[in-house]
Structures are given as structure tokens and as C-alpha cells.
Image (cartoon, rainbow, N blue to C red):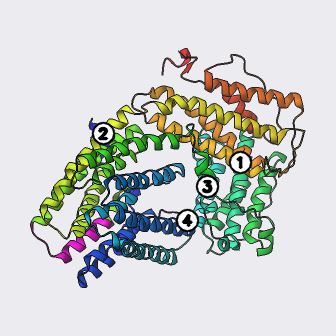
Amino acid sequence: MNLYVKQLAQINTAKIDIRKGIRQGIIMLIPLLYGWLFNDMATALLISIGTLAHIYAFDWTFTSRIRVVSLTSLSFVIAMMLGTLTTGNPIMFAIFLLIFSVIPYYIFTTLNVPGPSSTFFIIAYSLSIVMPQHPEDFFHRGVMVGIGGLLALAMIIVDHLIKSESQETQAIKKEYQLVQKLVHQFNNQEQFNDLTKIAVKTFLQTSETLNTTGSSLQKRSTRYQRSVLLHQWAEGIYSELLELNAKGIRPIPKVIQQMIDHITKEIVHPSETKALWRKRIDVEKQFDELVKLIFKVDETLTSTELRVKENIEIRSPQYSHRLLYHLTPESASFVATMKYTLIIGISIIVALVFDLERAYWVPLSAHTVLVGGTNIASLERAVARWLGTMVGVIFVASFLSFHPHIGIVVCVLALSAALTEALVGANYALAMIAITTQVILLGGLAQGNFTPMIAVPRFLDTTVGIVIAVIGVMIIGRRIASRNLPEIMADVARVESQIFHYVFSEHQYPKYHKMYHPNKAKLRLKLKVENMEMMYNRAYGEISSNHKRTQYYYPAIFLLQQINFKLTQILHDDRGVYLDERALGIYLVVFENIAKLFECGKYHDEVIELPELKHYAQLRQFLMQLQEIELYDYQDQRNPNLLKD
């Protein structure tokens, strides 16, 4: 209990986003000042709702932020217009409220987008219920919300212009600093292995960052294309280090460490005067490939525009494929969305049946609890939200009891918006005080009423929403993720087996055949691995599942991630390494044995010795390790080797 209270009060200072908080405070203040000065608070409220789209401007690339804020602003406009048209019809209002809750939740969950999910979509739709019922004003209200969205876009552009460097550049710098650590720690196998646990995620994050630069004009720029090439060489260096590690080739020559230091310095500090490399490179033959890759990095840094364009391959994030793929009961995000839909649906029905004064606060509170993702996280958010709301209500009621001037109310509202964005990642309970202040004062603006009593329904309705969400979390699908995880892991192993066969089979297929394009195969595997990772996180966050059993799946998940990383690289490799039918058959049998181990708990006492795999020794090593993996139980029998744990 003490540990939980400590976690509840702990502030993660690394996640305090002062920059974003200031931006949100400014764009919230602008329309409110207009409303105060020109006595037009109704319009000010509508514009301020549109500015909430800025909250979805996460720390991504400029193009991604423009795209997400534009789409969010458009969604807010549609939400406000539909909300205005349906407030007189409770059934239609409930249906559209559910739609504006579920669809954004599914998109944000599937694309692994952090943050508030559909929180402000619900607010944008529901605030119309406390406004005067004038359906004929739906277009005017939509336009005003759209103006707020334009204000949010303008803030993103200004922030981009004054920012020192792009997100793509930051990602590449972070990547090469990691490569530098990997090279320097290579001779210490234990420390090298620890670094590999974060390496793949770092490379995937950089890849996602580069892929989400959506502007074709940006993708044609030499700066962007140079970053893509640097990312590819960094992946190659990491892959080669894994190869050397698998073969036990140590120590790494000092001159290679110096070469890595040299190129990393050029990438991290491009403005400094570049020193020419003058040392002689004399290494053993097994390090030749690593040296070649480092030279490619140096060549890319100094290449002409034409040379860079000759070597580039542009990829896209393929959002639509990812969203469509996860529309299946096997997907963790789909299962989570179905559970979310049921709980939010119940909360909407309760709010409308009992005709609560601020009906939308009930599903909104239930939603914010469910955004926690896992059951444990949801319960933690429930307590944090309840305590934060209680303190926020007391603060707002006390503040309004002094009958403050409208100018002071405007300033407090802008300040609460800034504090919300600055603190929400650092401490949710503390941010909840600011959120409560913001939402109550926005509701007061909509009503034109600033008495202390407007704060009371907030606490009552929030409590009802939290209770509904907690009951739903405790009853619905308590162990779905932990039950499905073994099957999902087996599925990943089988897809990796198919790609392995495609890559190493002597019987070559057309490289860009419509039924088996390398990029299509890579996307399919990527989605499978994403689903596995999401399922593991949700399984580990279940209250009633065996956490020890789930924990013992992690080493296997890590190895499957490493195999995924290597296979997707080989898909674009031109070395032409093939296996004869006998050797290939042995590998495919091992893949299936591994899948059966996860799926059925069928453990093989004899480890199959895999044939050598030229240039890809680490891939063979990963499969050997997976054969020997120690799970918590086999065929529902506890593993006696792990009893001591």
C-alpha cells in the first residue's frame, strides 16, 4: 500500500513538458482574451475547443504533427456539428457519443499512439449538450471550432520554425550514440547483451520517425534521404556486431572504436570543424565487413546529392494496412477496443437513463480510466483520477466562491490548460487537478454560469464513471491477453518461418511478385510482432493472471524480436545465401517446434543442431536459444528447473 501511495505521489520530472504546456496555454488564452475583450464568450469557447487539437501534437516529425492536428481539428469540427444537431435526441446523441469514443480509441491503440486517446473527441462532441439548443447554429459552431484548429496548426508551424533541429535529426543522433556504446561495450559481453535489449526498439523508433515524414517534398530532400541512409548503415553495423558476438569473435580492435567515435562526432556535432581521418586501418579479416559499413557512413556524410539519391529507398508507414489488419479477434488492440466499447456503452446508458446533469462526464471518466491500457494501470488511473478530481473540485468551488472577475477566470483557465499539458506525463493525479479546473471552467463558459455549485456535479459524475470502469475492468476479459499470448507467439514464429523459407530457399521466386513482395512480407511480420508485444504488456498488466508465468515468456519474445529485425534486413540483402533442401528442412522443423512449444507447451528434450548459416550466424544462434528456452510450465506442468524462482 505504501508503495502504491508513493507511486501515486511520485513526479517523473523527465516527462514534464514545459514547452508544450506553454504552447497550449498561449493558444487557449488567445480566444479567451478575445471573448473577454469583445464580450463574446460563446465564440471564444468554440474556438478554444478547436485549440485542443494541439494536445495531439506529440513529439513527432513536423509532417506527422501537422497531419494529426489537421485530422483532429477536422474531427472536432464534425463532432461539434453533430453534437449540436443531436442534443435534442438522447438516443442519437448516445450513438454518436459512442462512435466518437470508440473510433479514436481504436486508432490510437492500434497505432501505439500515446496520450489522451479519444478524451478530447468526447469533449468536443459533448460540450454542445450544455450549450443552448440551437440546431440551426451547427455550421457556425463548426466553423468557430475549425478556427481554433487553425490556431493550433499555426502554433505547430511557429514551434517548428524556432526549433533548433528536426525530429529526424534527433533520432539519427540518438541511434549513433547507441551504436557508439555498443561498439565500446562489445568486449564486455554482459554489458553488450544489456544494450541489445534496447537496441532493436531504438532502431524501430527511428525507422517509424523517418517513415512518418509524409511530405513527398520532404522525402525528396537530400537531408532527409541522407538520414535514411545513415539509419540503414546503423542497422547494418548493429547486425554485424550481433554476427561477431554470435561467433564469439573478440576483442574488437581499438581502431574500430576510434572510427565509430569519429563518425559519431560528425553526426552529433555537424557544425564543428571536421578532422580528417589519418590513422591506418589494419584489422583481421573477420572485421572487414564492419569496417566497410563504417566507411559507408563516412561516405554518406560527404556524398553529393546525386550519389545519395542513387542509394535511397523510401518507405511509408502504411497506416491503413495496420488499421485493417487489426480488425480481428486475434488482435490485442481489437480485443481491448471491444472491451472498451462495452464499458463506455454501459456508462453512456447509465448517464442518460438517470438523467445526470453533466451526463457526458460519466463516459468521459470511464474512458480516462480505460486509457491506462492494462487492468493494473486502469485501476491506478482510477484512484489518481478520483483524488485529482476531488482536489480540483474543492479548488474550483473555493475559487468561484470569491466571485472572481471574468478576466481572472480566463487567466486561470489558460494556466490550467498549460499545467495539464506540462504535467500529464509526469504525474496523472496532479495533472487531474488542472484538468478538472479546465473542464469545469469550460462548462461554466458554455452555461454563462460561474457559481461554486457548477463544480459539484463534476465530482459526482466522475465517481459514477470511475465505478463503472473499475467494475468493467474487474469483470470483463480479465485474462484474455494471458490466454492468447502463447498462440500469438506461435503465430509470429510461423510467419518468421515463412519469410526464412522465402529468403534462403534455393528455389527462387520472382523478387517483386504481387503475392509476395518483400515490403508486404515485412509489414505482415511487423504487425504480428507489434501484436505480440501489445499482448505481452496487457497480459503482464492483468490482475488475476499468473505474472510469473507471463514473465518467463519475455526472453522468448526478445529473441523473436531479434529474428524479426534480422529477417527484415535480409529481405533487402543481396548476398544470395541459400540452403539446400535438407538444411532448409531442418530449420523449418525447428521453427515449427518452437511454435508448438509456445502454443501447446510441447517441449523437446533433444535440441536439434542447426546447420551453419554463412553470414548470418546470429540468426542460427537465436533459433538455438529458442529451442532451449525455459518457460514457467510445459503442458500445464510447472517446470521443475524454475521452482526455486
Distance from the alpha carbon under mark 2 to that under mark 1: 41 Å
Per the rendered image, the range of residues in magenta is 402-417
Check disc 1 and report the residue beneath it.
522
Q: Where residue 550 sits: x, y (%)?
A: 50, 29
Chief secondary structure of the magenta span? Answer: helix
The residue that label 3 is drawn on is 320
* The magenta stretch spans residue 100: no
Q: How crowded is mark 1: few (under 14 residues within 10 Å), some or many (20 or more)?
A: many
Q: Mark 2: which amino acid?
A: Tyr
* Viewer-nearest residue: 93 or 167: 93
Q: How far apart are marks 1 and 3 (CA)?
A: 15 Å
Which mark's residue is nearer the viewer, 1 or 3?
3
Q: Which of the two discs, 3 and 2, sits closer to the camera? A: 3
Q: Which of pointers 3 and 4 indicates the residue nearer the eye?
A: 3
Q: Which amino acid does label 3 sit on?
A: Ser
In percent of width and height, residue 8 lies at 30, 45
Mark sitting earlier along the chain (4/1) = 4
The reply to whether the C-beta atoms of the residues labelled 1 and 3 are less than 8 Å apart is no
Disc 2 or 4, which lies upstream in sequence?
A: 2
Tell which of 78 and 562 is nearer to you. 78
Residue holding disc 2: 4
Q: Which residue: 18% across, 76% down?
A: 406
The residue drawn where x is 43% and y is 66% is 78
Picture quarter containing residue 378? top left
Q: Earlier in the sequence, mark 2 or mark 1?
A: 2
